[in-house]
């Protein structure tokens, strides 16, 4: 699978970093989108416009801001094929509100919703063409939120944009994963403050990667305003995790 980071900034974006969104190419023309916060979704890329499944982690605006604009563009392209949006149950009204902002005539007819209450790792859907399963588990955030696991054959990748560290449900989901994309909102110096806000630091991300025994850690939901040098993020995580560590910059691509 190939994962492209469309946006990986925290709530305060910068010129180089936009809000949360990940495009995942699973092969056999299966593509999914996790979160829809980035303005890059307005770039009219064909591969984004052809996704059939969108997974929203939670209701905060930096994760859903441009979903309505994306759907409007799909409608203008005369899309007929069904599109399913999966989200935590308490995010439904926020999401539909953002969609209606860009679609005053109502939610496009090709859109379907599947809501769930994230808890222990739970199977969401199987995509037979690409031999892929999507799983969800509850994140430890300030609102109901999910992390998603993509299981393709023996390869598992887990993406968790917003969570405090040491979240038991997410650790269970990430156990033995090929890669963990993990929240890194606050600097190590305020690790305790980060936890209180439902977020993590590089230190916390490194701890979780070590506990889950993953091979690769990708630091996401970062604040470029706080980190002028991405190497500082890696150094913080490496205090606890000795595997491969990368920073998920906007437009970076990872293949597993």
Image (spheres, rainbow, N blue to C red):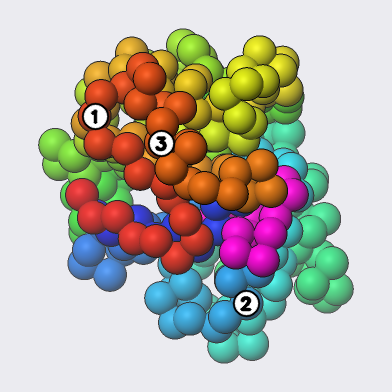
Classify mark 2: residues with Cα within 10 Å, few (<14), some (14-19) or many (20+). some
The Cα atoms of the two marked residues, 2 and 1, are separated by 35 Å
Classify mark 3: residues with Cα within 10 Å, few (<14), some (14-19) or many (20+). many
Residue 235 is left or right of residue 10, and the answer is left
Q: Is residue 140 visible?
A: no
As rendered, which of 127 and 147 lies closer to the eye?
Answer: 147
Residue 221 is left or right of residue 24, and the answer is right
Which segment is the magenta one?
Answer: 11-23
Estimate the x, y position of residue 45 in percent, counting from the top left: 48, 81
Estimate the x, y position of residue 37 in percent, counting from the top left: 65, 57
Rendering quarter of residue 170: top left
User: In front: mark 2 or mark 1?
Assistant: 1
User: In front: mark 3 or mark 2?
Assistant: 3
Q: Residue at x 66, y 13 (%)?
A: 192
Q: Residue at x 33, y 13 (%)?
A: 211
Estimate the x, y position of residue 56 in percent, counting from the top left: 58, 46
The Cα atoms of the two marked residues, 1 and 3, are separated by 11 Å
Dominant SS of magenta comes to loop
Q: Which mark is residue 42?
A: 2
Q: Which mark is residue 243?
A: 1
Q: Is residue 40 visible?
A: yes
Residue 232 is left or right of residue 41, and the answer is left
Rendering quarter of residue 105: bottom right
User: In front: mark 1 or mark 3?
Assistant: 3
* Residue designated by label 3: 234
Estimate the x, y position of residue 66 in percent, counting from the top left: 69, 64
Q: Earlier in the sequence, mark 3 or mark 2?
A: 2
Marks 2 and 3: in contact by CB < 8 Å?
Answer: no
Q: Earlier in the sequence, mark 2 or mark 1?
A: 2
């Amino acid at each position: 699978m190939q994962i492209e980071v469309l946006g990986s900034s925290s709530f305060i974006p910068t010129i180089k970093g936009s809000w949360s969104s990940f495009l995942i190419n699973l092969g056999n023309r299966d593509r999914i989108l996790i979160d829809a916060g980035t303005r890059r979704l307005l770039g009219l890329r064909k591969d984004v416009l052809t996704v059939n499944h969108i997974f929203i982690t939670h209701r905060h605006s930096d994760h859903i801001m441009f979903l309505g604009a994306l759907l409007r563009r799909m409608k203008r392209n005369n899309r007929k094929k069904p599109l399913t949006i999966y989200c935590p149950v308490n995010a439904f009204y926020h999401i539909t509100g953002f969609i209606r902002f860009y679609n005053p005539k109502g939610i496009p007819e090709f859109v379907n919703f599947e809501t769930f209450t994230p808890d222990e790792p739970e199977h969401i859907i199987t995509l037979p063409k690409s031999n892929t399963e999507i799983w969800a588990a509850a994140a430890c955030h300030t609102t109901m939120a999910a992390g998603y696991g993509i299981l393709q054959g023996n390869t598992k990748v887990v993406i968790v944009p917003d969570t405090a560290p040491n979240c038991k449900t997410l650790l269970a989901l990430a156990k033995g994963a090929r890669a963990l994309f993990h929240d890194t909102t606050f600097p190590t110096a305020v690790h305790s403050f980060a936890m209180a806000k439902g977020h993590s630091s590089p230190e916390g991300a490194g701890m979780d990667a070590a506990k889950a025994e993953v091979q690769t850690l990708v630091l996401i939901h970062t604040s470029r305003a706080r980190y002028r040098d991405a190497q500082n993020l890696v150094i913080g995580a490496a205090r606890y995790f000795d595997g491969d560590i990368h920073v998920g910059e906007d437009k970076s691509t990872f293949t597993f």
